[in-house]
């Protein structure tokens, strides 16, 4: 019996219904299998991560792996993120306080006259010359009062005599060096006066002696931390000094954040006075970094045969070609000292990557230098 139109529609509908039923049955199975596969991969990665986690933290709760446990995950030991954030902020504040205290104890306290006033901004070199002449006369007066001789009447700034056409940043740099030079001379005089007073109080014949042979301020330099890092390419068999394998250590430099103002001073004094001078260079507000110290005693046994080193301590010897002993009247208790010291100030390396006076920049005000930390809020 042939099917009419109604029967054909019924058969087609049954076929469509069967196809849809098969899809509805099998497709979720494939989707579920795919999910189970992804779950197994995630569980495997989590278990591998847990081995590293357990070295530093408490073991992960079974519920984190999808397993059942009667123990509540909220009872596990640990610290909430907001508590950690509060601890970090407190630690940062304490560190910044320690940095401020350390910088206050280590930096030079520069007086107001080391900055060019507003009414002298147009002629900063003239202001520097005026302050240098004023300080030079004040130092001469104190030298006479303390009975200390200084062979350099210009206190180290003779090459700058009459040099007034200088920018403001150079003028303020010279003013700071003038202050540090004056401070070092004052420390020498104070050391001699204190030693002389102590000898008189002990009813001893005063033997304290101090003579300043020369004082030389040098250009300021930017400095930072450094360290010797073992060279991974080092080979003890390498004989070529230019090879990378020859160096046992490599020097690693970090960003500069210290401006040093070095001054070299040559002294003739007795040992006790020099010891008092050394004890006074690290006081707060006048902290001096000792960069180099050379001590020479011409009366030591090994110095009797060769006295050529005395020439470097006598600025007039090279000009007149005279025996240095004719220029320096030394006693058994006297020593010759060459000491290089530097005053310090701090700057922000982000603003001044090469120092306070690079590319004609003016120095910044002294203030705390610290790294800014950003605590994530989420």
Image (cartoon, rainbow, N blue to C red):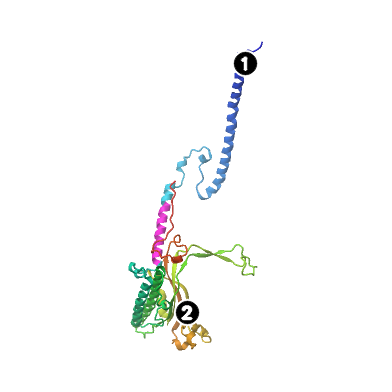
Q: Which residue is mark 2?
A: 295
What residue do we see at 51% from left, 82% from top? 309
| Residue 6: percent from left, percent from top | 60, 14
Q: How many marks?
A: 2
Q: Secondary structure at mark 1?
A: helix
Residue placed most toward the observer, 88 or 155? 155
Circle 2 crowding by C-alpha within 10 Å: few under 14, some 14–19, many from 20: few
Relative to 232, say whether 199 is above or below: below
User: In the orientation shown, which residue stands out farthest toward the right?
Assistant: 1
Give the farthest residue toward the top. 1
Between 265 and 100, the residue placed more toward the observer is 265
How far across and how far down the image is residue 17, in percent? 59, 21
Pick the front one: 152 or 203: 152
Q: Does the magenta-highlighted stretch encompass residue 337?
A: no
Report how far apart the C-alphas of labels 2 and 1 lie in the structure. 119 Å
Q: Identify the image quadrant of the N terminus.
A: top right
Mark 1 Cα-neighbour bin, 10 Å: few <14, some 14–19, many ≥20:
few
Q: Nearer the viewer, mark 2 or mark 1?
A: 1
> Is any part of residue 278 visible from this angle?
yes
In the image: residue 50, left or right of residue 270: right
Measured as percent of width and height from the top left, residue 257 is found at 45, 63
Mark 2 or mark 1: name the one nearer the start of the chain: 1
**Quarter residue 215 falls in:** bottom left
- Dominant SS of magenta comes to helix
Q: Secondary structure at mark 2?
A: strand
Residue 88 part of the magenta-drawn span? yes
Is residue 80 visible in this depiction of the protein?
Answer: no
Q: Which residue in the structure is indicated by mark 1?
A: 8
Range covered by the magenta-colored residues: 87-105
Q: Is residue 223 above or below residue 57?
A: below
Q: Looking at the image, which residue is at 59% across and 35% down?
A: 34
Q: Quadrant of residue 216?
A: bottom left
């Amino acid at each position: 019996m042939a099917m009419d139109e109604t029967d054909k529609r019924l058969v087609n509908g049954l076929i469509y219904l069967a196809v849809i039923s098969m899809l509805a049955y099998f497709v979720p199975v494939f989707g579920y299998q795919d999910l189970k596969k992804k779950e197994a991969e995630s569980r495997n990665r989590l278990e591998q991560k847990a081995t590293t986690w357990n070295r530093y933290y408490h073991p992960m709760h079974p519920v984190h792996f999808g397993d059942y446990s009667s123990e509540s995950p909220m009872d596990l030991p640990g610290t909430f993120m907001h508590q950690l954030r509060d601890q970090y902020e407190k630690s940062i504040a304490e560190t910044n306080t320690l940095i401020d205290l350390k910088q206050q104890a280590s930096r030079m306290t520069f007086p107001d006259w080391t900055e060019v006033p507003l009414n002298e901004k147009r002629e900063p070199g003239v202001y520097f010359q005026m302050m240098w002449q004023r300080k030079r006369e004040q130092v001469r007066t104190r030298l006479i009062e303390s009975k200390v001789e200084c062979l350099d009447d210009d206190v180290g700034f003779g090459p700058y005599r009459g040099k007034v056409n200088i920018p403001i940043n150079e003028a303020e740099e010279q003013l700071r060096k003038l202050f540090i030079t004056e401070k070092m001379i004052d420390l020498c005089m104070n050391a001699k006066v204190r030693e002389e007073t102590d000898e008189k109080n002990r009813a001893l014949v005063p033997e304290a002696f101090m003579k300043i042979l020369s004082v030389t301020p040098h250009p300021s330099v930017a400095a930072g931390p450094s360290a010797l890092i073992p060279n991974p390419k080092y080979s003890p068999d390498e004989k070529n000094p230019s090879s990378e394998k020859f160096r046992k250590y490599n020097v690693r430099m970090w960003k500069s954040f210290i401006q040093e103002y070095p001054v070299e001073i040559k002294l003739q004094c007795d040992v006790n006075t020099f010891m008092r001078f050394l004890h006074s260079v690290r006081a707060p507000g006048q902290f001096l970094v000792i960069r180099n110290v050379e001590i020479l005693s011409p009366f030591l046994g090994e110095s009797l045969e060769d006295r050529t080193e005395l020439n470097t301590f006598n600025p007039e010897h090279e000009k007149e070609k005279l025996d240095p002993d004719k220029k320096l009247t030394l006693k058994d208790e006297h020593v010759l000292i060459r000491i290089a010291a530097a005053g310090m100030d701090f700057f922000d390396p982000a603003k001044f990557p090469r120092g306070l006076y690079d590319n004609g920049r003016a120095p910044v005000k002294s203030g705390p230098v610290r790294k800014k930390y950003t605590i994530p809020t989420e």
